[in-house]
């Protein structure tokens, strides 16, 4: 799922994957950002949405991140930049190093075990288990800088 961030005052728009934005929020929290929650601006007659809205950041419901929250997010991400390497880490995705041999039932044949392992890898998210600092290292770092600049513009909607 793609999230489009829109700054209404400047009409600047940025698109990010949900995974990218989720990792950015996780990174910001690790560097001191305390989310205030989003606001859902609705029509006056849409009472139901106002009652049930939970302040989520990771949906594309048109919710608004208020200025104070956006600036706090930018500040925390800016602090994190110093700790993010310019080079991507080398990640060993070999599941055999990550698991015990007892992870699967004994009755599976070697071919069935291989099928299960391949299925897991085929559906694993790209940033699985990566710490946000590792996630943004290397090629993703410029996109994080772009997000910081965007957040410094102030309040924005998530669509």
Image (spheres, rainbow, N blue to C red):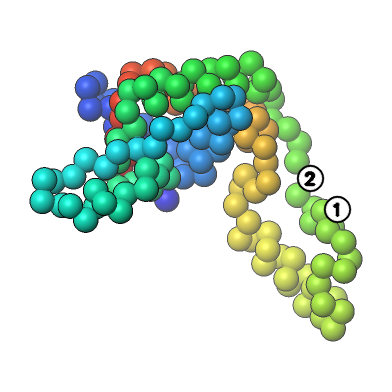
For the point 33% across and 23% down, the residue is 67
**Above or below — where is 136 with respect to 92?**
above
Figure quadrant of residue 27: top right
* Closest to the observer, 149 or 44: 44
Q: In the image as oriented, which residue stretches furthest toward the front?
A: 51
Q: Quadrant of residue 8?
A: top left
The disc at residue 97 is 1
Residue 89 numbered mark, or none: none
Count up the numbered dots: 2
Q: Which residue does the image show at 68% across and 63% down from the upper left?
A: 120
Q: Nearer the viewer, residue 35 or 73?
A: 35
* Residue located 26% across and 51% down the image: 51
The image quadrant where one finds the C terminus is: top left
Q: Is residue 84 visible?
A: yes
Q: Which residue is mark 2?
A: 92
User: 57 or 120: which is nearer to us?
Assistant: 57
Q: Position of residue 146 (x, y in %)?
A: 45, 23
Asked if disc 1 and disc 2 are in contact, CB closer than 8 Å, the reply is yes
Kindly identify the residue that appears in the image at 39 percent across and 37 percent down.
Answer: 37
Rate crowding at label 1 as few (under 14), some (14 to 19) or many (20 or more) other CA atoms within 10 Å: few
């Amino acid at each position: 799922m793609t999230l489009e961030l829109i700054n209404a005052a400047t009409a600047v728009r940025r698109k990010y994957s949900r995974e990218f934005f989720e990792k950015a929020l996780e990174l910001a929290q690790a560097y001191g950002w305390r989310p205030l929650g989003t606001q859902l601006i609705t029509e006056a007659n849409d009472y139901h949405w106002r009652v049930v809205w939970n302040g989520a950041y990771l949906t594309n419901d048109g919710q608004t991140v208020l200025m104070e929250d956006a600036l706090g997010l930018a500040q925390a991400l800016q602090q994190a930049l110093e700790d993010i390497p310019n080079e991507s880490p080398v990640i060993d995705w070999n599941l055999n190093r990550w698991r015990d041999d007892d992870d699967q039932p004994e009755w599976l044949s070697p071919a069935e075990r291989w099928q299960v392992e391949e299925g897991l890898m085929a559906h694993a998210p790209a940033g699985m288990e990566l710490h946000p600092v590792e996630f943004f290292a290397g090629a993703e770092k410029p996109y994080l800088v772009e997000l910081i600049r965007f957040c410094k513009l102030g309040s924005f909607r998530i669509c």
